[in-house]
Amino acid sequence: MTLVAHRSVRALAAVLVAAGLVLGGCGSAGGTPAGSTGGAAAPAAVAPAARGPFVAAANPLAVEAGLKVLREGGSAVDAAVAIQAVLGLVEPQSSGLGGGAFMMAYDAATGEITSYDGRETAPAAATPELFYENGQPLSFGDAVLSGRSTGAPGAVAMLAMAQKAHGRLPWNVLFGDAERLAREGFTVSPRLARFIAGSGGQARTRWANAYFTKPDGIRYVAGDVLKNPAYAETVAELAAGGAEGFYNGRIAREIAGTVAQEPRPGALTAADIAAYQPIERGALCRPYRVYVVCVPPPPSSGVAVLQLLAMAERTPDIHGGPDSVAAWTAFAQLQRLMYADRDRYVGDPGFVRVPVQGLLDPDYVAARAELAPGLTGAAEAGTPPGGVFAGSDATREPSGTSHLVVVDAQGNAVSMTTTIESVFGSGRMAAGFFLNNQLTDFSFTPTRPDGAPAANAAAAGKRPRSSMSPVIVLDRQGRLVGAFGSPGGPSILAYNAKALIAVLDWGLPVQEAFDLPNLVAKGDGFGADTGRFSEGLREGLAANGVVLRPSASEESGLHGALWRQGPTGWSWDGGADDRREGVARTR
């Protein structure tokens, strides 16, 4: 494992190759990954450099906005700004200007990967008892709908930071599609309509009711045209004034004013919003088979994905492929170990010591992997080198999130996961967009009965732990070969790991990999797309103690691509999860 702090990942790959780490399990330079079903070739030294255009995102209108920017000569980051602006309008249940994000940006010219942290922060008045009332924690539903759930939004500041470093077009030209669609209206999609029709929670707040109800008193349905003039004004102001205006003017005041309203007003102020700062970090990279997989460091949970992959390398059953009971059983057991460690140790590194090196230590990983076959229930967290004992955390993370991938003509790439947390966030709106309920990602119980503090306890200015873990994949020369990611709350880690194993180990086409059943093993239960598993697999898994139950919550939204050689040459093998409404396009 290596933490890349703004140095060329090509140099890292060369070091790994010299150490024999990246090449482990590879028979030849042009061979297939160890355990592959042979469906796709491993990256070869003769492969041309990956180039775009390529865009995958959760809504066709957002994808078109991104491709338009690329056609006009924009960079991958430029396109990501345009995509996010449109997603906040047409997929408001998942992400927006009132939320946060993590971005992985690959620079083809330098070989560097930069991780941008746009995670929301708690207000200055926040305490570990943020969601306590009368000495008891609030119910999750009450906490979400309260003003206390909203942190200072980070997505806009993060995008501005990344665009300043990697953009080619002027900032003010990136919001045209979002403004036009907001003024002229956009067609409500079936998925958005389903959430608008929700019978309670965030879909029925006074803000949501006002936005989603037509003048005749009927709520918008699929096929209706929905306008949002307030959002149009906001993106026009954002285009003209940049992020500085967003965080220091009218929009910030409106956010703070909305948070201060009943029920249970929050403490977020305009000063908290003005004080928000995104963070530029190095990427966390680790060799996997013949690849190098890179994710954001904490407070992202990307380290957990790398830990699962490291354990998978030591688990021969994983090689069995998508029809193997043994492979799925092993995948479930490794997840239990991964989640136990993640829940114990991962938090905001500005406040707690996260044992990143220890969680990926080869001896520790090997010892954890050896526990997998004997697990019969929830796994206990281990004791990685450098780990400080902390209280375990069972924080709920709803899946109001989205993921996008962009590659531009120069081969620069973005993998970005963006969120307002729950569906429609807190259900509160300001300046035409929904506000996040991201602070419910903090532990509701900041200490264990024995007094051990939770690594993910709330604190002033702290970023809550996140499961968002956008992925960039490199070949052994440190060149871009893939980018992946998904929404899904804590299940993101399982979804991303499934996609990576299915593509990199089993050699599946990307769309087939995304469409595989989801299996999530956290604690002592299993969530799954039970209907997507064959009867034989279900019976075999049950015999191994992996008893699947129907779970509507396992709705991944994987988007991404792998640079592959096909019959007509090298191209992007892209995909968009069929569980949602996204598309993947090259033109």
Image (cartoon, rainbow, N blue to C red):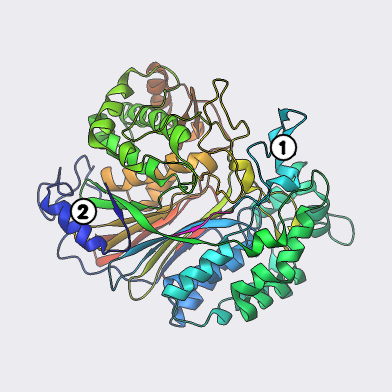
Q: Nearer the viewer, mark 2 or mark 1?
A: 1
Most prominent secondary structure in the magenta stretch?
strand
**Secondary-structure class at tag 1:** helix
Residue identifier under label 2: 41
Q: Categorize mark 1 by other alpha carbons within 10 Å: few (<14), some (14-19), many (20+).
A: few
Can you say whether 71 is above or below 568 in the image?
below
Task: Say which of 403 and 348 sits in front.
Answer: 348
Q: Would residue 484 be seen by someone viewing this image from the given angle?
A: yes
Is residue 282 rendered to the left or right of residue 157?
left
Q: Residue at x 73, y 60 (%)?
A: 255
Alpha carbon distance from label 2 to label 1: 47 Å
**Residue 221 colored in magenta in the image:** no
At which x and y percent is residue 424? 68, 51
**Quadrant that contains the C terminus:** bottom left
Q: Which residues are drawn in magenta?
A: 116-120
Kind of residue at badge 1:
Gly
Instruction: Give me the disc on residue 141.
Output: 1
- At mark 2, the secondary structure is loop
Q: Residues within 10 Å of mark 2 (few under 14, many from 20)?
A: some
Chain-order first, disc 2 or disc 1: 2
Q: Position of residue 374 (x, y in %)?
A: 33, 17
- The amino acid type, in three-letter code, at marker 2 is Ala
